[in-house]
Image (cartoon, coloured by chain):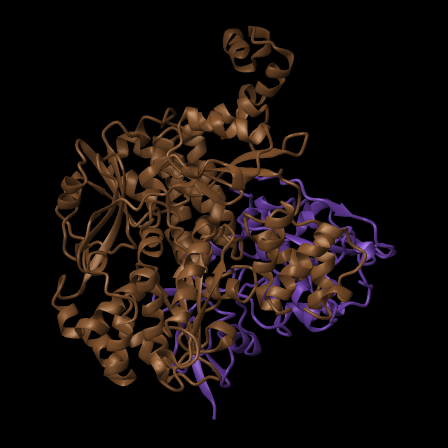
Amino acid sequence: MTGVSTLVSAIPEAVAAAVEATVARYRQDPHYILQMLREIQEACDWIPPEAIDGLQQALHLPRTKIEGVAGFYAFLYLRPRGRYRVLFSDNITDRMLGNMELLRHMCERLWIERGKTSEDGLVSVDTTSCTGMCDQGPALLVNNYAIARLDRQRVDEICELIRNKVALAAWPRQFFRVEDQVRREDILLGGAPAPGEALAAGCARGAQALLEQMKASKLRGRGGAGFSTGLKWEACRDAEGVAHYVVCNADEGEPGTFKDRVLLAAHADLVFEGMTLCALAVGAHKGMLYLRGEYRYLLDHLHTVLERRRRAQLLGAGILGRRGFDFDIEIHLGAGAYVCGEESALIESLEGKRGTPRNRPPFPVTHGYLDQPTVVNNVETFAASCLVALHGGDWYAAIGTSASAGTKILSVSGDCARPGIYEYPFGVSVREVLSACGASDTQAVQVSGPSGVCLAAADFDRRIAFEDIPTAGAFMVFDHRRDMFEVARNFVHFFAHESCGFCTPCRVGTSLLRNLMDKLNNGHGSPYDFTEIEKLNRILQAMSHCGLGHSACNPVLDTIAKFRSAYERRLQHKEFRPAFDLDWALEPARRMTGRDDAGAHFAKRSAEET
Amino acid sequence: MSQSFSIDGKTVEFADGQTIIQAALAAGVYIPHLCYHPEFKPHGSCKLCTVAVGGREIAACTTLAQAGMLVESDTPALNDERRALTQMLFVEGNHFCPSCERSGECKLQATAYDLGMMTAHFDHFFPNRPVDASHPDVLLDLNRCILCSLCVRASRDVDGKNAFALSGRGIKTHLIVNAKSGRLADTDVTLEDKALHVCPVGVFLRKDKGFTVPIGKRVFDLKPISAYVDATAVLAKE
C-alpha cells in the first residue's frame, strides 16, 4: 500500500481512490492492468483520462499501452456510457425470443437512442454478443450483471429503477436469478465427489501415475479441438521453464454455449480440483481461471469456494499436508472479447495485453503465460479429470466411443420444450438429444455455435463425437418457422463484431461478409454476391491468423448448401446490383422533413418517367 | 553448414533461425509484403507474404525456413488472394493516390500495381478517420493507415518512446498517439524518429518538404516493387 498514494497525485479524488485501491490490490503489477481497468470502471462507471494518468504513474506504463488495452475490450469504456449500461444479449436465440422488440421498448421508455448515452448521462442501451443465457433468454447485462427471462413487464420495472436512480445493489434479487436447468446428468454432473476426494486419489497415485491414468483415459479437450489432455499435461511437464502454469479457459464465448456457467455455478469444486490435479502432474504452483466478463456475477461465489478450499488445505502451501505441493488459483475476469477464448489470445489477455492470438508455434505447452510452459484446458476438461483421478483411466475410457471417451455436456437452446444442460456419453445421436429436449418440427440444429456446423434433418442420425460431429457444447435448435438466412446473418454479424482486427483477411473480410449478407437482406442480392461470398470464404479460410477467421464463413456456406431456398428468396435480381440505393439513402432526409410523397422518392419518380 | 529450400523451383540457401521471407529476400527472391521490415521482429498481420508449403498457406514472415521445403509463392492462385488483400486494405481506409505525397514511394500502391490490381473491387467503407496537423514538423494522416504496426514497433524498440499503439478492435482498430489530448503535438515525437521512416504508406508526412522528386520519377515509378532486391532499403535512402 505504501508509496502508491504519493505516486497518484493531482487527479480527482474519487478516481484517485479507485486507482489507488486497485493498484494496491494487484501489487502494482502491470500484468494485471486489465483487472485494474475493469475495477476502475466498476467504481467510476467508465475509465476517465485521469484514471489512465494515475495508472501511468503508478505502473510506469506508457499511456499508449493502457489505452491500447482498454480500447480492445468491448466492456471497457473510454468515454462516459451512463451510470446504467444496459446491453441486450444478441444471439439468434435471444432474437427468436424477441430481444429486439424489448430493446426498442426500453429505448422508448427511457427516451434514448440505441447505442447513445442519454443526455443526462444516466443510461445507455445497446446490444452485445451472446451472454450465455440462451436457455433462459432474452437476457441483458446491466453494468455487467446478468438479468435473464426478460419480458415487457420486467423491462418496464428496470426502466423504473433506472429512472429513479436506484443503486444496482438495491434492485430486486430475483431479477438476477440464473437457473442451472440441468436436464440430464451422467457421470460428471451426477457424481459430485466430495471436495478433496479426487485430489486425495490423485495424490495417492502420485504425479507420474496420475499422468499415465490421464493418458489411458483418452480424455480429450472439451473446448472443441479435442487434443489429448494427458499428452498436453505431459508435454507441459517435460518442457523446461522457470515456472509452470495451469490455466482454465472459462471464456465461454461461443454463442449458444452455457455449460461452463453451470459447471462453475454448481460444481466449482470439481473445476478447481481438476486444476489442482493438473498442477500436481505438471509441477505448477500457480493457476489462473479466465472467466468471461459476462459471468461477472459468479465472481464472488468462485472466490468463496477458493477461500473454503484454502481453509480445507486443498489449495495453498502444503496441499493435503504434502510438503512441496504448493498451488493456488486466481481468477481473471475478461471484458467482452470472444477471441480471448482462443488459448494464445487468452494468455495475452492474462498478461494484461490486447487479446490478439499469437503466432504459433511455439504453443502454450512450451511457451505460454510469461513465455513459460502452460496447460490451457477447458472448464469441463478439468472437471472430467477428477473422474479419471478417482476411477482410473480404463474406467473413463470405457465410456463413450472408442475415439471419444467420456461424456459431453451440451447446452441446448432454441426451439424446444426443455432447454438447458444435457450430459450424454459421446456417441449420442442428434435425434436422441432433440427428442429428449422436446423439440418438434425441427428444421436445423447448429452444433458448436457459429464456428461449428449447421445440420439439417438428413444429418440428425449423426453422432456427437470427435470422429463425427465435434462440439464445444452449443446445441441450438431451429424449427420450421425460422428463417435460416437470418440465423446465418446473425452469426456473420457476430464474427465481424468479434474479429480482433490483427490480420487483414479477418479484419476486413468479416466486415465485407457482413455487408454482403445485409445487402442480400436489403433486397439487392444477385448470383454475383454468391460468388463473392465463396471468394471471401477461400481467403478467410486460407489466410486468416486464427480460427475465428477460418470459421467465419461456415454459417453462410452451411446454410447456402442446406437451406438454399432461404437465400434464393432474396436473390431478387439476375444481374449485379450495387448495395447502395439512392432512394434508400434519402430516407433520413424524408424522416427529417416528414415527407413521403412521390416527389421525395428518387426511384419512384424515375420509374414513372421512364 | 549451408542448407537450402526451394521457392517456385529456385534454390534458396538459409541459415538456422531464418524465416522464409528473410532467406528469400537475401537470395533476391521477392515475396510481396507490407508489415514485414528486416529490422523488426516479424508481426505476421498483413498476410501479403502468404506462401504455400505442401498445399497449406502460411505467412512467410513468421515461418522458419526448413531444409528441403518446397515453397510456392509466385503463382496465379496466391497472387489472386494477395490482390484481394490489397483491395481489402484499399477499401477499409481512404487511399487517394493521385493527391498523395507518397505516390510512387508507397509500398501499398506499388504492391497493388505489381499484383495487377485495376480496381478496388469491394465496396469502399469510407471510414471517418482524422488528420492531425498539430505537430510543427509532421502531418499525421490516419486515412492511409493499414495497421501494420511498424511505427508502433519502431517507436517502442528503436526510439524508446512508445509514441504509438493500436487501440480499438476489429474493423475499428486504429492508431493512437502517446498523449492525453490525443494530439501528435503533445507527444515527444521528432522528425528523426525511426517510427516516422518505416511506414509503408503515407501516414507521416514532413511539413516543410514535399514533392522534391516529382511524381513519375519516384522509385516505384521507375521499376515495379518486385524488381527491387530490397525495396525497404531503397525507400529508406529516399
Question: Could you say which chain is coloured brown in the image?
Answer: A
Residue A149 in percent (x, y) is at 37, 34
Q: Quadrant of residue B65?
A: bottom left
Above/below status of B69 relative to A42: below
Tag count in the figure? 0
Residue A473 in percent (x, y) is at 28, 52
Q: Quadrant of residue A362?
A: bottom left
Q: Nearer the viewer, residue A434 or A266?
A: A266
| Residue farthest toward the bottom in the current orientation of the protein | B1
Above/below status of B194 relative to A511: below
Residue A601 in percent (x, y) is at 56, 12
In-image side of B19 versus A195 (left or right) = right
* Residue appearing at x 24%, y 54% in the figure: A409
Question: Could you say which chain is coloured purple in the image?
Answer: B
Quarter of the C terminus of chain B within the rendering: bottom right
In-image side of A316 versus A190 (left or right) = right
| Residue farthest toward the front in the current orientation of the protein | A311
* Residue appearing at x 43%, y 65% in the figure: A307
Q: Nearer the viewer, residue B102 or A344?
A: A344
Q: Nearer the viewer, residue B116 or B50?
A: B50
In-image side of A501 versus A215 (left or right) = right
Q: Is residue B194 visible?
A: yes
Q: Quadrant of residue B76?
A: bottom left
Q: Is residue B10 visible?
A: no
Residue A535 in percent (x, y) is at 40, 47
